[in-house]
Amino acid sequence: MIIIGELINGMYKAVTRAIADRDEVLIHHLAEDQVKAGASILDVNVGPFSNDPMSDMRWLIETIQKTVDVPLSLDSTKIEVIEECLKITKKRAVVNSTNADIERMDRIFGLAKKHNAQVIGLAVDKSGVPDSREKRVELGAVIINKALEYGLSIDDIYLDPIAMPINVAQAQGIEVLETIREFRMICAPAPKIVIGLSNVSQGAKKRSLLNRTYLVMAIASGLTCAILDPLDKDLVDAMIAAELIANKNIYCDSFLDAYRKK
Amino acid sequence: MIIIGELINGMYKAVTRAIADRDEVLIHHLAEDQVKAGASILDVNVGPFSNDPMSDMRWLIETIQKTVDVPLSLDSTKIEVIEECLKITKKRAVVNSTNADIERMDRIFGLAKKHNAQVIGLAVDKSGVPDSREKRVELGAVIINKALEYGLSIDDIYLDPIAMPINVAQAQGIEVLETIREFRMICAPAPKIVIGLSNVSQGAKKRSLLNRTYLVMAIASGLTCAILDPLDKDLVDAMIAAELIANKNIYCDSFLDAYRKK
């Protein structure tokens, strides 16, 4: 399971403040703590309130790269920001994200090929988030085909079925879980499959319980990656247990510690 | 989700002692607590150390029926014990269990028809627990066919794919989860599907974590019933959250309480 740490995001007030004050200490802590807790990629997002996303993203990336040595997920809707960031990331980056719109895919996959980056592809297009698994799978296939057209390898694509908040789109839970199963069969080898986990509990109570339960169900369906809070210990414990049951790691009495040491 | 409470079982020392001493108080507590925590059926098992299973089962059943008014799951390998118990259960009983052997099915389904009981059918035969999902599904179909032959309705059969301990048969986890999916498609309407949950963590560490993670994965695959410890609050919370994500109950902010009040 690939964990993409979600905590360096301007959605969090402390991060917005750190960006405004150019406070490296908080960002260093968030980067180190997430990597220590198991994140192998860190998401970087200046949030919706940034006045200068280009400069803020650049500062975040430079700050993070002073303290940890992991790939970054460049989380921005602005293609020109992504393009600049791809020039300064030291490790192979993940572009977060493209949707299934032709123009955006052309730009993003072109950039990804040029800069040897991976890409998260969202199963959504101009008509919005699909209601059904069938439409999601169709968009997933469109994304894979376009990526291959640009010379990317399947292994460099993370398909995202778009997990929706339970309290507003409850019926979508099953659709997303079934989409994950079908994404696995879309091509061989199967693409990576990712969800933005915290989204499922947005606005709901008992968020940690809902997040970890959703993650375990998604792992049962074949999820291979999630953008999540790696500092939620109960969540990571549940993930480790689910991967054990799915036979991805060998059981030993100290399986929680063993996984974390690895 | 149908919860069959597992705690009245001679595997637990306190229960063995209560049986030996004819101590009604402990049994009353175990029965009431499990029903209050959400069990709609109580499993009754004298355990492996009973010198007189017939008399001990009869006493347990009579004792339980003095305090709660729920169906009982008659958990015994001895057909003559099951036959006697079926005569004294006040609610419609569940026979736990038959396997896919012809002689046992003939006896158990004959009794079930005569006494209007439901039956748990284990996907196992004389050659033991199958390694593969295919063999499990084949045995499930054999059980369903034989039950129908005896005039039982599909709705009265609980198919059990046999969940194995993770620490000795780790690769079986996925086989069991896939079997659950395939059991749903074995006939229409789908049969009930049950697992003996605690078995998966037998001899392992972090049993509660493994149990609730396995349960959530099984619910994602379509499980409709489990024999479990309803007093494990984290386990029941996880079950409620999983059923919410699977859209079996409507989300509200107090979804944990709402489920329990129902």
Image (tube, coloured by chain):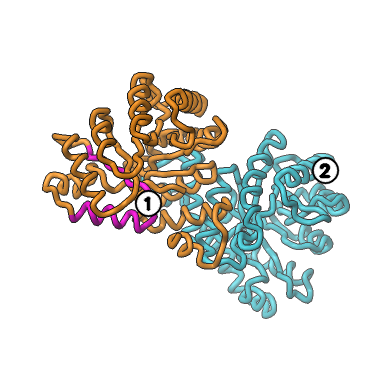
Chain colours: A orange, B cyan
Residue at 67% x, 71% y: name it: B10
The magenta stretch spans residue A39: yes
Q: Would residue A131 be visible to someone looking at this image?
A: no
Residue at 63% x, 76% y: name it: B13
User: Residue A109 got which mark?
Assistant: none
Closer to the camera, A18 or B208?
A18
Q: Quadrant of residue B19?
A: bottom right
Q: Residue furthest left?
A: A21
| Magenta extent | A25-47
Q: Residue furthest right?
A: B103
User: Residue A39 got which mark?
Assistant: 1
Closer to the camera, B224 or A254?
A254
Closer to the camera, B233 or A11?
A11
Residue B256, image x, y percentages: 43, 51
Tell me the CA gap for discs 2 and 1.
52 Å
Amino acid at pointer 2: Lys
Amino acid at pointer 1: Ala
Please tell me whether mark 1 sits on a helix, a strand or a loop.
loop
Q: Residues within 10 Å of mark 1 (few under 14, many from 20)?
A: many
Q: Would residue A121 be visible to someone looking at this image?
A: yes
Q: Quadrant of residue A84?
A: top left
Left or right: residue A55 versus residue A215 is left
Q: Which residue is mark 2?
A: B146
Q: Is residue B16 above or below residue A67?
A: below
Q: Nearer the viewer, mark 2 or mark 1?
A: 1
Chain letter of mark 2 equals B
Please tell me whether mark 2 sits on a helix, a strand or a loop.
helix
Residue at 77% x, 70% y: name it: B53
Residue A28, image x, y percentages: 23, 54
Left or right: residue B135 versus residue B246 is right
The magenta stretch spans residue A149: no
Chain letter of mark 1 equals A
